[in-house]
Image: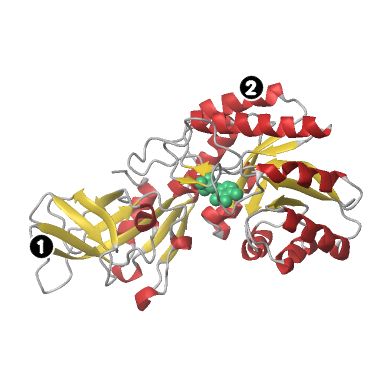
Amino acid sequence: MTDPTAAVRDRALSLPAAELPAYIYDLTALRDHAEAVRAALPGRVELYYAAKANPDPEILAALAPYVDGYEVSSGGELTHVHQAVPDHPLAFGGPGKTPAEIATALELGVRRFHVESVYELRMLAELAARTVPDARVAVLLRFNLPLPEGSLENSSLAMGGRPTPFGIDPAEADESVRLLTGEAYPQLELVGVHAHLASGLEAGEQLAVAESVVGWAVALAGRHGLRLSEVNVGGGMTVDYTEPERRFDWAAYGKGLAELADAHPHLTIRIEPGRALTAYCGWYATEVLDVKHSRGEEFAVVRGGTHHLRTPATKGHDQPCRVLPVDDWPHPWPRSRAGQDRVTLTGQLCTPKDVLARRVPAAGLRAGDRVAFSLAGAYAWNISHHDFLMHPRPGFHYLEGSRG
Ligand SMILES: *Cc1c(COP(=O)(O)O)cnc(C)c1O
């Protein structure tokens, strides 16, 4: 369980039922959080926001004072982020970049690429020569590096250290470095190494990953007599959906990164979190439509569902939530009401997978009560299958209060 801020609670209760469900983004809370994250990191560590976690323009703009740039992973994200936060540095990553996307990126002024394969490296070189012949283009080679021992246990999505479509196999590292340092591609400058190996990692595990990636990059540079200037150690800082109050330990992570940065004074270390920056600021608020008994258990059907908030269905968890009781009842028919202590909250879709949270303590829950689901600011609306069953889209609300 988790408590909405007063502003979120007020909005969730004051919206007319017909304007629910609604996504409510607390931009003040987002700014406070981003400021705290930035403050915990050493000045020399750069912070990019991975836009795919939530590319809402208001969120991108709210983060702008606290981040050094944005990581985009598609042509769509690229043009969108470029428009939403003009003049902020972008790094273009992600697998399967098309020639048209790369050309657009170059035309829009993107000069930092996370290159995913030797094939893509050659494509980038030719397109840069054609599109922006006078520009210097910074390349970070993304490698599929092994995860350090013991750091995999808690990670929910490992994309490194095993066969995956992400990054360059370390066996091709020397070939890709030679290509970049030879005569062939004078426009491309190998500035460093990128690795995003897993998500759902705690601070200690993230530090182990950062140390291992930096160590690997330094060794690669040493073998080739180069000096790399950047290492991007990725995102994947954990968000705990079972204990929303427990947050990633940014202070410990920042302290460890400071030591790592001090040990490599010529290197800019960069991180690119998504989820851990924006998950907390978002709420999905809705209304209970019906409460029913079914073969010994109770279910509350709410307006909306996993076609708006797919996170619990994809991650297989219960989305944390808080019931907001509403005593007024405007209808002539009687309210349906829970008789048991625990109620499973489902959406309006005709599929048993449309479950938002199972067996939530909600004694006395009634039709007409409201529910605010938390941790809905990342991988929530933007990963959901909105059109399934043709229910109306939620409203979007952005709360700006005085800063505490
Ligand atoms: C998704 C992604 C991120 C962000 O991951 P989070 O788990 O949201 O922090 C960062 N970098 C890359 C390359 C990604 O694909």
Q: Earlier in the sequence, mark 2 or mark 1?
A: 2
- The residue positioned 51% from the left and 30% from the top of the image is 149
Give amino acid for label 1. Answer: His
Tell me: 400 left or right of 344: right
Tell me: 106 left or right of 168: right
Location of residue 137 in the rendering, given as x and y in whole percent from the top left corner? 82, 51
In the picture of the structure, the residue carrying the numbered disc 1 is 293
Colour style of the rendered protein structure:
secondary structure
Q: Is residue 307 above or below residue 162?
A: below
Location of residue 212 in the rendering, given as x and y in whole percent from the top left corner? 61, 30
Of 254 and 148, nearer the camera is 148
Quadrant where the N terminus is found in the figure: top left
Q: Is residue 258 above or below residue 163?
A: above
Give amino acid for label 2. Answer: Glu
Cα distance between the residues tagged 2 and 1: 57 Å
- The residue positioned 66% from the left and 61% from the top of the image is 78
Residue at the front extreme, as displayed: 171
Mark 2 residue element: helix
Of 236 and 107, nearer the camera is 236
- Does the beta carbon of the residue at mark 1 sit less than 8 Å from ligand 1? no
Q: Residue 259 bears which disc, if any?
A: 2
Location of residue 344 in the rendering, given as x and y in whole percent from the top left corner? 20, 56
- The residue positioned 77% from the left and 33% from the top of the image is 221
Figure quadrant of residue 52: bottom right
Of 175 and 89, nearer the camera is 175
Mark 1 residue element: strand
Location of residue 11 in the rendering, given as x and y in whole percent from the top left corner? 36, 57
